[in-house]
Image (cartoon, helix red, strand yellow):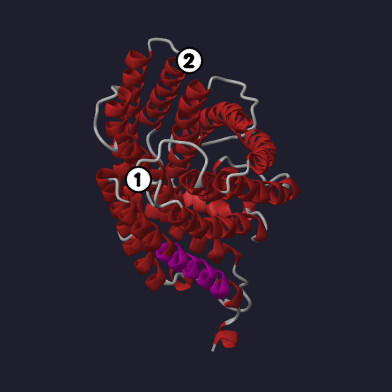
Amino acid sequence: MTLAAGAFLGGAAGRLLPASVPFRYFATAVAYHVLAWLALLAGARDAPRFAGGLGWPLAALHLTTLGVVVMTAIGASLQLLPVATLQPVRAQRWAAALWWLYTPGVAAVALGMGLPAPAVLGAGAVAVVAALLVFAALFARNLWGAAGMPVVIAHGWVAWVSLAVALVTALSLAGTYVGAPALDRRAALALHVAFAAYGFMGMLAVGLSCILVPMFALSEAPAERPALASCVLAAVALVLAGLAAGGVVPMALRTAAIAAGAVAVALHLALMQRALRTGMRRDLGRGFLLVRGAWAMLAASLALALPVTLELPVAGIATLFGIALVPGWLLTFLLGMLQRIVPFLASLHAPRGAGRRPTPSMLTAERPLAIHGYCHAGALTALCVAAILDSALFAGAAAVLGAAGAAAFAVFFVTTLRRMRGATAPESRA
């Protein structure tokens, strides 16, 4: 049984967190988005062939993953999962308090990596892990009592297990820099990339897509059987990648993991394209141009993972894989969705006064989004050129373009909040 977008929307307003809760996460993600590009600018010399190690490229990577992607995912899932799973919102204080632990933890991690200062990194890692353990408890509570949308729930549980693996490996990698690793660094790094990027953040993104794409396109939710098949294949790919990281016939299992992941992605994207094709709303704005681009980069990341796995001597291939995976897919997808989520939630939270609630389009500033879209595309292109040519100049240009786009996105966000707060009765807006 599929859930129509109308049914989802019909229950949304009655299960809302206070506006301050999701918007504090989104606002922080917007700020860290700017800082991530500035950190890349600081480390532009080492970025084109970055292969790990402390420094500003690593800080930029984690400001993107922890500061933008995970921060957004926490805010979105805390708000959207109760709506999707037909539950009342619980633990509002914990949802709000979590931000106070997670936000400074991310800042400390980034500073500790960039300066570098291993003690600061270690303290930040402990704070981030503690905050994500709280999030995991809230997330599991939502999944455990869920009624409805089994596809979203299945993806949620895979993301939850992946988060546990990602946290263990993150602590081990952070411990390497203070002389106390828990796992072999190479194995921990392989596990961390697979389970943090594809497992936790990736499965959350895919699961939330099953809510958001039909909701914004005004179509039915994806058919359960192929969507669950995609989830199972993705979980199999993660298990195979985990075994390979542990040293079990690594080349063969990594190749098999890529193949399983590719089929899972193909199924998911076919379902998303069907939702867009059959939806009643066809013009989904600039945000979905980014979403479509992110889907292409997801497929590209798997294609690039194969030569990395086979250790082919292609200059810059590992960096290109990282670009496709993190800023190409995860960051681009989240920014595209935020362009739709922020005005949508703002319209639900806007004071009604004596008039109608404003529509999302009334709250959206289009010009900053246009600037952001061009800058973001230019930044990704320049990053790819930098990796291919091993050019610090192109890496710096990418950082400047990315920072300009991030600033434009911040203008969009602030404008939406300002319009939300000013959306009162018609006579007060005259």
Q: Quadrant of the N terminus?
A: top left
Q: Position of residue 212 (x, y in %)?
A: 45, 48
Residue 406 highlighted magenta (yes or no): yes
Give amino acid for label 1. Pro
Task: Please give left or right for residue 286 compared with residue 248 in the image.
Answer: left
Query: Is the C-beta separation of discs 1 and 2 under 8 Å?
Result: no
Tell me the tag on residue 400.
none
Q: Position of residue 109 (x, y in %)?
A: 61, 44
Q: From the image, tell me which residue sits under label 2.
A: 246
Q: Is residue 241 visible?
A: yes
As rendered, which of 305 and 21 lies closer to the eye?
305
Q: From the image, tell me which residue sits under label 1.
A: 48
Above or below, comparing residue 233 to residue 178 in the picture: above
As rendered, which of 190 and 186 lies closer to the eye?
186
Q: Quadrant of the C terminus?
A: bottom right
Residue drawn 57% across the image and 51% down it = 11
Residue drawn 40% across the image and 49% down it = 333
Residue bounds of the magenta highlight: 404-419
Quadrant housing residue 24: bottom right
Residue 225 highlighted magenta (yes or no): no
Distance Cα–Cα, label 1 vs label 2? 29 Å
As rendered, which of 185 and 377 lies closer to the eye?
185
Give amino acid for label 2. Gly
Task: Please give left or right for residue 165 compared with residue 318 in the image.
Answer: right
